[in-house]
Image (cartoon, grey):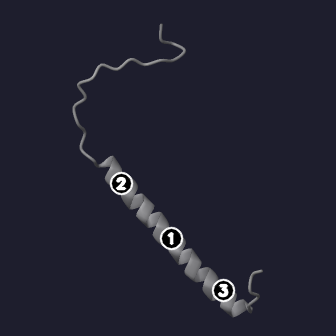
Amino acid sequence: MNEVVGDDEWLAIRVALMEKAKDLTRLRDEVSAARRAMPWRNVYEDYTFDGPDVP
């Protein structure tokens, strides 16, 4: 069962949790940007695509 606390303590915990969530969002954005900035590489294999419009 969860602990019951007063309004001031709850708010302090909530603010700290929101800051962690912001940090997580910033880190996810940073990782996503790094992934998009990765260099491309040559692909030498032949590819065959399957789908509804492929004979």
Quarter assignment of residue 1: bottom right
Q: Earlier in the sequence, mark 3 or mark 1?
A: 3
Q: Residue at x 67, y 91 (%)?
A: 9
Relative horizontal placement of residue 51, taking residue 47 as reference (left or right): right
- In the picture, the disc for residue 49 is none
**Pointer 3 with pointer 2, Cβ within 8 A:** no
Measure the C-alpha gap from mark 3 to mark 2.
33 Å
Residue 11 spot, x, y in % from top left? 66, 86
- The part of the image, by quadrant, that contains residue 5 is bottom right
In space, the residues marked 2 and 1 are separated at their CA atoms by 16 Å
Q: Residues within 10 Å of mark 3 (few under 14, many from 20)?
A: few
Q: Which residue is mark 1?
A: 22
Reading the image, the residue beneath label 2 is: 33
Give above or below for 27 relative to 50. below
Q: Residue at x 56, y 82 (%)?
A: 16
Q: Where 44 falls versus 53 (above or below)?
A: below
Check disc 2: other Cα within 10 Å, few if <14, some if 14-19, many if 20+: few
Q: Residue at x 74, y 92 (%)?
A: 6
Q: Amino acid at mark 2?
A: Ala
Residue drawn where x is 22% and y is 31% of the image? 42
